[in-house]
Amino acid sequence: MTTFTNAVNDLEQARKFFHRLSVDDQLAWLWFVYEKVGETITPAAPGAAAAKIAEGLYAQVKHQSKQDQLETMRAIAQQDADNLISREYGSLSANTKLAFWYALAIGMDRGEIIAMPDHYELSQQGHELLAAIETLDFEAQITLLRNAVEPMGAAPKADAII
């Protein structure tokens, strides 16, 4: 493995590696983390976050077409200030952002949110970062996830309502 295994010892380095992944690899990585460690994340994210706010943002995404859902998730990951949901997401606390991504993953499981394509192949770097998070203890996993999703989303635009 490359230096991604260093993520076990340096969560800040792991966060930087995550943000160097392509946008689609970031989204895929979040999905694969949910699949591998989602059950242990369940009590941490919703319990510490403003669940109703995360649910409201999730509902906005849920009511979009599948293609628009994907574009919204990409906009959030890319910090797109021209996307309203990205700006709304940008105003959330780190724990609420984590709860939002958790809700999206559950929605993907339920078929409410566009699913990961069966043919999608996560990059080697994504696989290595995924392997690294599996070796972390629960607290470090949550910290890495929170650090990964916290900078996503955009700040409100000067001429926008949000």
Image (spheres, rainbow, N blue to C red):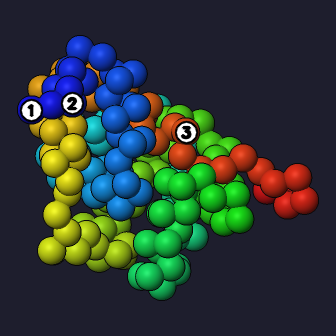
Q: CA distance from mark 3 to mark 1?
A: 27 Å
Residue lying farthest left?
1
Indicate which label's residue lies in the foreground, 3 or 2: 2
Residue 67 percent coordinates (x, y): 44, 82
Q: Residue at the spot x=35%, y=61% of the render?
A: 24
Front residue of 9 and 85:
9
In the image, what residue type sits under mark 1?
Met
Residue occupied by mark 2:
4
Residue 78 percent coordinates (x, y): 54, 55
Asked if the residues shown at circle 1 and circle 2 are in contact, with their CB atoms under 8 angstroms apart, the answer is yes
Q: Secondary structure at mark 1?
A: loop
Q: Secondary structure at mark 2?
A: helix
| Label 3: few (<14), some (14–19) or many (≥20) C-alpha neighbours in 10 Å | some
In the image, what residue type sits under mark 2?
Phe
Q: Quadrant of residue 103?
A: bottom left
In the image, what residue type sits under mark 3?
Pro
Indicate which label's residue lies in the foreground, 3 or 1: 1
In this rendering, position of residue 145 left or right of residue 79: left
Label disc, if present, on residue 151 of the rendered structure: 3
In this rendering, position of residue 135 left or right of residue 79: left
